[in-house]
Amino acid sequence: MNENLTFTEKMKLKFYDAKNWAQTKLHNVANLAKDHPMETLTLIGGLATGASKAYKFAKLHEDKVHRERDFYDPRVGKTTRASRKLKSYELNEIERRYNRGESYQSILFDMGLWK
């Protein structure tokens, strides 16, 4: 039966099948929530707590990455970001060259670490 359908018709058929499947699952979940209200509230509370903790963890991780990779140059008034976490000898070289008067951007560019 499906062999004689065009590509567009096959895609429409798959879309409608997926839509019907999603509506059926949503209807089943709604019925389950209606039949078990306390369990549903407990589950929603747990999911909200988990999402909150996951968001907090993601923000802390992002801040840690920024602290490891960002270099603020007050002479230029600009922040430059390295492409990855730097090794200790790279940090030593950057500090030595910065103290000689080079900007962080030019140092990171020369070292191939400028993002």
Image (cartoon, helix red, strand yellow):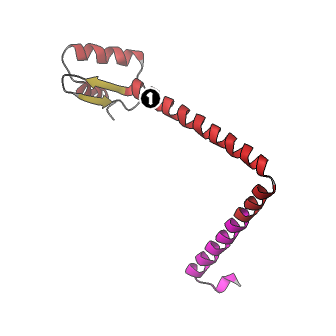
Residue at left offset 38%, top offset 32%: 83
Residue at left offset 68%, top offset 42%: 45
Residue 15 image-quadrant placement: bottom right
Front residue of 9 and 52: 52
Residue 51 image-quadrant placement: top right
Relative image position of residue 7 (x, y in whole percent): 57, 79
Q: What quarter of the picture does the N terminus occupy?
A: bottom right
Magenta-colored stretch includes residue 73: no
Residue at left offset 38%, top offset 27%: 69
Which residue type carries mark 1?
Asp
Relative image position of residue 28 (x, y in whole percent): 76, 62
Q: Is residue 21 above or below residue 76?
A: below
- Secondary-structure class at tag 1: helix
The magenta region covers 2-25
Magenta-colored stretch includes residue 13: yes
Front residue of 76 and 113: 76
Q: Which residue is mark 1?
A: 63
